[in-house]
Amino acid sequence: MAATRAAIGLWRRLLTLLGGLLGGLLAVHSARAVDLPEDKAEALVHSYIGGGVKANGPALLVRKSVLDKVSLTGSYYMDAVSNASIDVVTSASPYHEVRHEFGVSADYVYRDAQITLGLMSSHEPDYVANTGSLDMTQEVFGGMTTVALGFSRAADKVGKKNSPEFSESARHWQYRLGVTQILTPRWLASLNFEAISDDGFLGSPYRFARVFGAAVPERNPRTRSGRAAKLRLVGDLGNRDAMHVEYRYFTDTWGIKAHTAEIGYSRYFGEKWLADTFVRYYTQRHAIFYSDNAQSETVYVSRNRQLSTFNDMGFGAKLSYDVRKVPGRYDLKLNGTYEYTRFKFKDFTDIRDGSLYGYGANIIQVYLSATY
Amino acid sequence: MSPLRNLAGAVLLGATLLSGCAVPTVPTLKPWVKPYERERLADPLMKLSRDALPDKHFEHVRSVREGARGATGFQGGGCGCN
């Protein structure tokens, strides 16, 4: 009898202890205002066809939390590129190459803050790029404001096919600062700044410039520093639909000034369908050393049309279908996106006929996304 | 008035100002959208980025063709694509 009472007493003490521990754990969880990113997987097939370039391939991403403290992400992205762009067909032979990119990251949440550490490695036959990044977000002002800070550092090794003696490098630094603000129960605004610095070989060993009509290897400065600022507004329109508007300004020490504007509309149809549409416009002024055909000898000269004066306009649509949803267990969606973009160059000519160059590009994405 | 008394007065005034007591204060800014009013903001429609891979693909397509970069909310990474 005494032994039974002792056993019951011990059992009660154990239950009390377990209850205390559980209560403590729950208290810790309730003290954490920011949740870890939800567990998620994405499987994408992407395609870009435009200007003589075809780039397509698969991409995968898996994110899983471990012990409810850290969320780990692994990703793989492949680009199989067939390049017969105007640069290539007017100065070299079309080529095919594959790029593989691997990424891992870890998210850690403590109270109102989230810290993300990421590593990324991109491999092409003649270019290897390794990037490390550290980002932090902090909710303040009763959760109405989220402040984000980030830093990336990348180191690239640049090679040249069939030229083993060619060996160059480039380094990149990126510093990010962002604020997301709840304006009303229906409107959000975000303001992002980024400073980017590049150092090293910042061109292409294959690209040619034109000086007095003759082809010469391009000569780019070995440093570049840029600043970008973007404002975005997102609003719930009240009928299971929403819109967003955004604007970005960019300027750099190469003389490029660019404006990007986008407006989009999203809406649910029934319980299973979600549609998005958007229009995007981009315009930029050329770099100071860009020339379609330079008429004087200068230290730096480039005919890279990415540095020319041009604009592009894109129209896009996306459809998402909820394939299967089991509340509390998983949610599987099938998604398709299509965008058509038209590029118009103002000071880059097709040297075959002297006309100003332009082309249209089709971008297609089909992917499955699942939260679990 | 001794310097010590001046110092004590300054400390007292500072503490009073910091604590916000006994001094007519400027109205403080408080969060005006309560947590229970943020249901619509939690809808996927309102997310700045719903899915990482397709957004990364668009970002990549643009960054190798346009001169502008950054402030997109993506970390990005180097490649020899341009």
Image: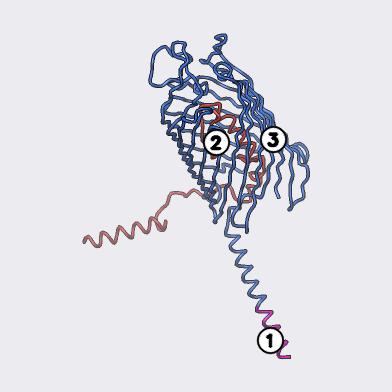
Q: Which mark is residue B70?
A: none
Which residue matches tag 1?
A6
- Circle nearer the N terminus (3, 1): 1
Amino acid type for the residue under numbered disc 1:
Ala
Badge 2 marks a residue whose secondary structure is loop
* Identity of the residue drawn at 47% across and 25% down: A257
Which residue matches tag 2?
B72
Badge 1 marks a residue whose secondary structure is helix
Q: Are marks 3 and 1 in contact (CB under 8 Å)?
A: no
| Left or right: A13 in relation to A246 | right
Residue A59 visible:
yes
| Pointer 3 chain | A
Tell me where the magenta segment starts and ends, as one range: A1-13
> How many callouts does the rendering have?
3
* Identity of the residue drawn at 68% across and 86% down: A6
Quadrant, the N terminus of chain A: bottom right
Badge 1 density bin: few <14, some 14–19, many ≥20, Cα 10 Å: few
Determine if the magenta segment contains residue A12.
yes
Query: Relative to B44, does residue B17 appear above or below in the rendering?
Result: below
Q: CA distance from mark 2 to mark 3?
A: 22 Å
Residue A316 visible:
no
Which chain is blue in the rendering?
A
Do marks 2 and 3 share a chain? Answer: no
Residue A357 rendering spot, x and y as whole percentages: 57, 15
| Pointer 2 chain | B
Which residue matches tag 3?
A45
| Left or right: A238 in relation to B28 | right
Between label 2 and label 3, give the one nearer the viewer.
Answer: 3
Which chain is red in the rendering?
B
